[in-house]
Amino acid sequence: QVELVQSGAEVKKPGASVKVSCKASGFTFSSYYIHWVRQAPGQGLEWMGAIRPSGDGTTYAQNFQGRVIMTRDTSTSTAYMDVSSLRSDDTAVYFCTREFPGTGYFDSWGQGTLITVSS
Amino acid sequence: QSALTQPASVSGSPGQSITFSCTGTSSDIGTYDSVSWYQQYPGKAPKVMIYDVSKRPSGVSSRFSGSKSGNTASLTIAGLQAEDEADYYCCAYAGSTYVFGIGTKVTVL
C-alpha cells in the first residue's frame, strides 16, 4: 500500500537548520510530485512548496523562498526538505504529501514531523 | 498569497445537513477548478474528501459534496454524523502554487 514515512521529531535552536525526510513506498516514486505542508500548533495548514517527479524543478510559496530547499533521491524513494534560519514561529508539524497525477490534490500524507524551535 | 477565507466554526445536529464556504480570489478559485477539501482529526494527517470542486475519491462517503460559484467554493455534509466532527480545510490551485483555507471546525451537537 501507498505509504509516506517521515523522520522523527527534532528540537532546534533559533538560527539553526533542519532537514526532514519522507520515505515513500508502495508506488512509483519517480512519477509523483511531492508537496510539503506545515501546521503550527493550533493553526491551519500552510502549503510550503513542491518538487517535480524528476527532481529537476521546485516551486515554493513566497513565504519560504530563499529559506527552504526541497530535494529528492529517486534511488531511495525519499524526499527531503531543508529549512534554514529557523525562528520560533517555524515551530510546527511538517507533512509531506503526494499529489495525485494531473489532479492537483493530495491523496496520501506522511504522519508528520514536529519541529520545535526554542532557545 | 493570502489564505482562503472559511468560517471558523459550523455546527449541526445529527442527521442535519450543513454547508460552509471557502472564499478566494480571481487568481485561484475564480480561475481554476482545482479545489479540494480535507478532513483532519486532532493529531492526524489530513484526508482528502473532495477534489476538482465536486469529485469524491474512492471510499469517501456520498454524504460529502462540493460546488463552486465564482470565487467561492462550498462543502456540504448531508446526514451529519458524530464521526464528521473534525476540522475541514479547502485548498485551491493558484497557478503553480497552492493555498489552503484557514479551516472550519465542524461540531456535531
Image: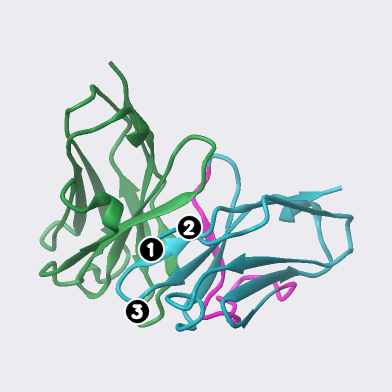
Chain colours: A green, B cyan
Which residue is the site of mark 3? A101
Q: Is residue A45 magenta?
A: no
Judging from the image, what secondary structure is the residue with disc 1 in? loop
Q: Chain of mark 1?
A: A
Whether A88 is drawn above or below B43: the answer is: above
Q: Residue visible at 13% across and 67% down?
A: A55
Q: Residue visible at 48% across and 57% down?
A: B3
Please tell me in which quadrant of the rendered image residue A94 appears: top left
Q: Quadrant of the N terminus of chain B?
A: bottom left
Residue range in magenta is: B44-64
Which residue is the site of mark 2? B3
Which residue occupies the foreground of this view, B102 or A7? B102
Circle 2/circle 3 CB separation < 8 Å:
no
Residue type, label 2: Ala
Which residue is the site of mark 1? A2
Which residue occupies the foreground of this view, B5 or B37? B5
For the residues beneath circles 2 and 1, the answer to whether they share a chain is: no
Rounded to the nearest whole Å, what is the CA distance between mark 2 and mark 3?
Answer: 24 Å
